[in-house]
Image (spheres, rainbow, N blue to C red):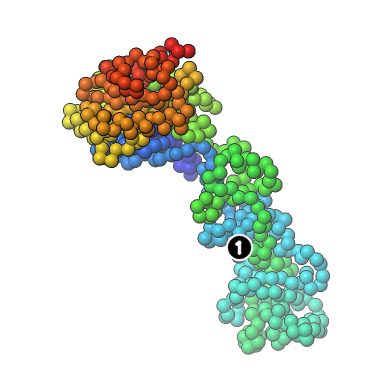
Amino acid sequence: MNECLFNPLYVIGHKNPDTDSICAAIGNAAFLRKHGYPEAIAARCGELTQRISWVLEQAGQPLPVLIRDATPTAESICHNNMVSVLPDDTFLTTYRRMIENNLDVIPVIDNADNLHGLIRHFDLLNLLLPRQLSDDSVRTVVASLDNIARTINARCLTGETLSTDDEELYLLVGASSEPSIRSRLANYKRKGLAGKLCVICGDRPNIQLFAVEYGVRALVITAEAHPTADIREAAQESGTCILSTPWDTSSVGQLIRCSRRVHDVVHREFVTFSSTMTLTRMRQIAVQSRQSLFPVLCKHTNKVIGIISQTDLVDPPRMRLALVDHNEFGQAVDGAEEAEIVEVMDHHRLGTLIATREPIRFINEPVGSTSTLVARRFFHRDEKPEPGIALCLCAGILSDTINLTSPTSTSIDRQMMEWLIPIAGIDPEKFTDEFFATGSLLRGKDTDPYAIIQADRKEFVEFGSRISISQVEEAGVYGFEAVRKKLQKALEELLQQGKYRLACLLVTDITSHDSLLLAVGDEAVLDKLEFKRQDDNLFLAKDVVSRKKQLFPAISRALKSIE
């Protein structure tokens, strides 16, 4: 089976995803599925705004997969198609399974996925050889008649239902002279042990009859020999079970010992990994353990979900990511630095660049939207995306360029928008009006100031300072004053929690193409901002609509002047 089915390529945007981030992920995943990556899946690392949900509904697209963390865990790297045995499986079943799969140790798991322990080659020896040798110990075997019959491929000739309960049986091979066999049977009879005997013999009618007359527990007739009707009838009366096997007498004597269940010798002192355990922690534990195999248990149910070997921890499979709309680990899904980055597609400045093990495709161009770059991939291949994908890409361009009015807009953005509109089958004016009217964050009934700040927030590092910039786009900023105090308080909490030098919210009016900037943090930085200051924390940013091309450069200049 294709390996990619077990290791998807997640196409994913930045934290606190905006419309362009989600739509670019959906569009790029669709493109990659057609061009070399059939396993590509659109993903997200944050919750969706009402506006993005509206776009997906209009496009008929499912929600991208939610991935909170890309760090390799026991669950993500374990083998789910593990080889195991049941507690009631026999030595022979276990041994064969280990040999066929070249295993030195195997987990013992019941039908409800509960872990009973591990079985090693050394543990199996305890089923064949007693710890202390004596005449009784070497003859004794604890097994059920059902397991014995299965192990030696025997048929029951007395018509009874074979017991599945383990019994202590004494093996007696009927290969000696008839007087000797009769004497030994009589000796067991006197001790009250005849009912625990399992007699093994070939085509020797007299020995068969002796065994039945003394009422032994089982008579195993080898080489498919058949007892007479009289012997079978006598056996039914005495309660002796007659089994017929194609194996010879010598082989049966050995195979019966292989019919013992493994649950008696399960190794119960072992180390397991929780499904959420990180790769680093697993390596620390494995180094201190002599185990070669580690069962993985679900954190919530404690059931077995897979197995990990020592060698799996050397260079395990990592989550594969294709990043869109960002190019910094600081903005990527948690754990991205431990994932395999396959591709990056972005339209922002180059920040703290992502390090990769191998060369990758890195696309970064000064256009207004990452969705533009995705659309151009289809365009250059002379391929039309599906209407729903085209609609998503239209929304991504529309959002990031504020309907092509942002200073970040380029002729390429306009060209791709014009190409996509007929494919998506939308009325551009109607779609634009409905898009920006949907999901007003400022005028919502139950406005959550923290949700507003987190809806589209990005982090930057400039001159050693951490900066948080959030942005909302509104058709008019009439609802701002009503929630301003709550927004400022939320920014101040974020400032402290994230240890930022500056935390700000850009409220952009898409009708006037102006913005209000609410900012908290280092007063020295605030004082150097080049926007018109309304009060201690509010600025009027005329003609400012772009976080990337206008606001962040202004903050950078303020920081530089201080440094």
Amino acid carrying mark 1 in the image: Pro
Q: Which residue is mark 1?
A: 87
Residue 72 visible, this angle: yes
How many labels were placed on the picture?
A: 1
Q: Nearer the viewer, residue 138 or 455?
A: 455
Figure quadrant of residue 533: top left
Q: Nearer the viewer, residue 144 or 511?
A: 511
Residue 35: x, y in percent?
39, 31
Residue 202: x, y in percent?
71, 76
Q: Nearer the viewer, residue 315 or 379?
A: 315
* Residue found at x 71% / y 58%: 123
Q: In the picture provided, is 539 more to the left or to the right than 257?
A: left
Instruction: Determine the secondary structure under disc 1.
Output: loop
Direction top: furthest residue: 561
Q: In the picture provided, is 283 more to the left or to the right than 399?
A: right
Residue 475 visible, this angle: no
* Residue found at x 25% / y 40%: 445
Query: Where 417 sits versus 236, above or below?
Result: above
Residue 527: x, y in percent?
38, 16
* Residue found at x 30% / y 16%: 532
Residue 284: x, y in percent?
64, 40
Figure quadrant of residue 439: top left
Q: Nearer the viewer, residue 446 or 335?
A: 446
Q: In the picture provided, is 169 more to the left or to the right than 47?
A: right
Query: Where 441 sits versus 6, above or below?
Result: above
Disc 1 crowd, CA 10 A, few/some/many (<14, 14-19, 20+): many
Query: Where 204 sits versus 153, above or below?
Result: below
* Residue found at x 81% / y 67%: 133
Q: In the picture provided, is 506 more to the left or to the right than 207?
A: left
